[in-house]
Amino acid sequence: MHLGGFMSFPPKTPFRSPERDKLTAEIKAIAAELSRRKDVDALMPLFNHENPDVRFWAGTQFMSANSEWALAAFSSALEDLPTRDILALTRRARELPPSRPTLQEMSVKQLVDRFEDACMRHYGVRYLTGEDGGPCYSAISRVSSEIGRVVGEIENRDAVSQLLPLLDHKNVVVRRCAAQACLPIAEAHATAVLEAIAQCGTGSEDAVEAADALQHWRGEGVYGSLPRH
């Protein structure tokens, strides 16, 4: 049942109409009855539905039934990704990296792999929520600090050039963070990557971060935080 207006970015105020209000009331009434029956298994096809509007409504109406799946379904509708992909990202984001070997004990290749993994976990934290229902700032801070430490160790080895292949990574956060790190050694290439990200969507988190990195670099000749969170 497509009502429109929910899946756009930035979000738009849904158009009000008698037909829409009637459909909304019907959806909420059905959702209330499904919630009353407490049959979580019956809700799983809705969380995984191919239609983003169905996932959106499932995510908003069945939070008490299974908050993890509901949040993933809601985010998947906004991002146009399968719910299982969002769920995998959030679970990965919660994972702590192994304590050994330490960064100092790692080879350069291991450090690059760790950088990529940390960036993917940083991508996943955007779909986590804190106890207050807002962003999970503790996870954001933890993964952001890890990325900064990894970059610092790579810089200590004079091996930043090993991050250059990641400028073409399929994930936007990996590309962005790699480009930020590579600005001092490959300004033209790194700037082009950041400019492309900055133009990818007005108001999106990655566009804002990329534009901010470019502003810092062009204004001060240095960008000292990877990432800025």
Image: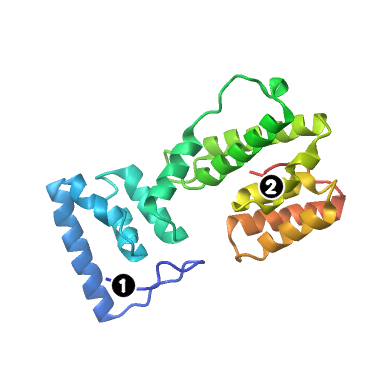
What is the quadrant of residue 50 in the picture? Answer: bottom left
Of tags 1 and 2, which is closer to the observer?
2
Q: Residue at x 25, y 54 (%)?
A: 45
Q: In what element is the residue under mark 2?
A: helix
Front position in the image: 33 or 112:
112
* The disc label shown at residue 196, or none: none
Question: Is 132 on the left or on the right of 138, as rendered?
Answer: left
What is the quadrant of residue 82 in the picture? Answer: bottom left
Q: Which residue is mark 2?
A: 166
Distance between mark 1 and mark 2 Cα atoms: 39 Å
- The answer to whether any part of residue 152 appears in the image is yes
1 or 2: tag closer to the N-terminus:
1
Residue 213: percent from the left, percent from the top? 74, 52
**Mark 2 neighbour density, 10 Å: few (under 14) some (14–19) many (20 or more):** some
Residue 167: percent from the left, percent from the top? 71, 51
Q: Residue at x 86, y 50 (%)?
A: 220
Specify the color scheme: rainbow
Q: Quadrant of the N terminus?
A: bottom left
Q: Which residue is mark 1?
A: 2
